[in-house]
Image (cartoon, rainbow, N blue to C red):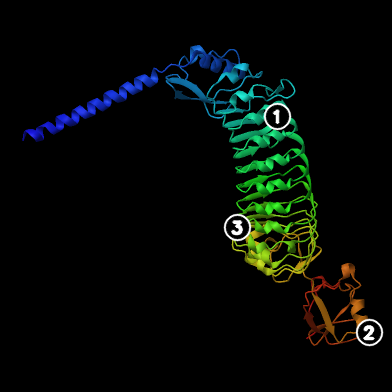
Amino acid sequence: MKNFTDIPRAISVVVLLFLCVWCKGQEETSAAPMEKTEKEALYSTIQGFVGNLWNGSDLYPDPCGWTPIQGVSCDLFDGFWYVTALHIGPIEENSLDCAPEVEFRPDLFAFKRLKSLSLFSCFVSPRLHPVSLPTHSWEVFSSILESLEFRSNPGLIGQIPTGFGHLRNLQSLVLLENGLTGELPTNIGNLTNLRRLVLSANRFKGQIPYSFGGLDKLLIVDLSKNSLSGPLPSTFGGLTSLLKLDLSSNQIEGKIPSEIGNLRNLTLLDLSRNNFTGGLTQSLQELCSLEELLLSNNPIGGDLSSVEWHRLQGLVILDLSNLGLTAGIPDSIAGLKRLRFLGLNDNKLTGNLSPKLAAMPSVGAIYLNGNNLTGELKFSEGFYGKMGRRFGAWNNPNLCYPNGVGGSASHGPYGVRQCHQEVTLYGVDADSKSSLGNGPNGSLNQNSQSMASLGFPVYGADVLWCLFLSVNVTRRFTTLDINGIDKIEHRSDG
């Protein structure tokens, strides 16, 4: 029995020892010092961004301990606290907001363990207080900095410092919606650990450096909304890990390189609003993981048959509008079962439309307006009702839909007219038929006199003929429209 009574006592001792060790660890952690130079660098750097009225030493005497600063992260190294992340700007509710007049202080480069630096909406006035990025000292972060982000800073001007090319441990470089100018430094190609490169919505110009094609660990490249020109480097074919490539809204020219087909993991390719020419490269069909392909607003030319579209079964969005495409729409596009958006508007496409387009199981929007498509639309009234104006076929002068489909204006294809009907009047020669169309708008002459004969109306002052109307709906365009025939009043003398 003695052995059993000792068990609870032993458990209590173990728990007590564990609590003592844990409390001692907590005490040591909370009491861990921060190097004086590290703390002073933190206070001074933040003060440069938020203003001199901010007194960090009084407000946050233990910035990595019991008085943490929002946006500042720390880690222990060799028994000392060091700043590992500094995020300034209105990112979260209690984040530090930047002052109207901000500055980069040299103390920024005194951090010894900084892994992440982010400044959001701090430099907001390019006219009243423009600020340039520091040109020197970035090399001190060469082996430690992993993420560098400047977002929504229109007052951040000047060029990308060449010192960024020394940040060899960098995995994410984001310079988004700033006022930066100049050409892209070629030594960005030295950052071989980059996973994300976002330089969108600045004022960069010049060519995309060929050296970027050597960054084979990249997952995301976004150089959109700049003024970049020249060709798309064929070296981009080496970015085989790439998931998203957005070069939209630039002035890039030349052919889309065939090497683009090497990007088998790509899910988004956006080359819209550029100056690409030379037709659609066949290698696009090799992008087997592609979900979004946007090439709109380029003078590419050529036709759709150069690509085997059925091989891109993952496509959800396909926007090929305003490319100067000619010829017809191949049936293989209708085989894209996951496609939700199809934009082929504002081209020079011709021919008839396959009813298979309406049978795509996921489609929610089809835009074919502004082409030279011809013939009769063979889609159901239910299709028009479901799509509404998300089915765009207007501005195709020789396209029509048959009578009896879309009886109400809300269920017909918007902006497309009904196919006209031809009227054959048996017993009337060609000249007489012609004379019946002399009324306004090509309708029957309203001045014709009606006479009663066996309860049927007859026409003409000189000729009596039994009227036997046979409406021959030929579904081709003619100047005589059954809908234009004036209503005939049936009268009988008894």
Q: Residues within 10 Å of mark 1 (few under 14, many from 20)?
A: many
Residue that protrudes farthest toward the left in the picture: 1
Q: Which residue is mark 2?
A: 462
Q: Which residue is mark 3?
A: 314
User: Which quadrant would the C terminus be assigned to in this image?
Assistant: bottom right
Left or right: where 439 falls relative to 247: right
Q: Which mark is residue 160?
A: 1
Gap between marks 1 and 3 measured at Cα: 37 Å
Q: Residues within 10 Å of mark 3 (few under 14, many from 20)?
A: some
Q: Earlier in the sequence, mark 1 or mark 3?
A: 1
Callout 1 amino acid:
Ile
| Tag 1 near tag 3, CB within 8 Å | no
Callout 2 amino acid:
Asp
Q: State the image coordinates of residue 105 (x, y, percent, origin top left).
A: 63, 17
**Which is nearer the eye, 233 or 153?**
233
Callout 3 amino acid:
Gly
Q: Earlier in the sequence, mark 2 or mark 3?
A: 3
In this orientation, does residue 492 appear?
Answer: no
| Tag 2 near tag 3, CB within 8 Å | no
Q: State the image coordinates of residue 235 (x, y, percent, origin top left).
A: 70, 46
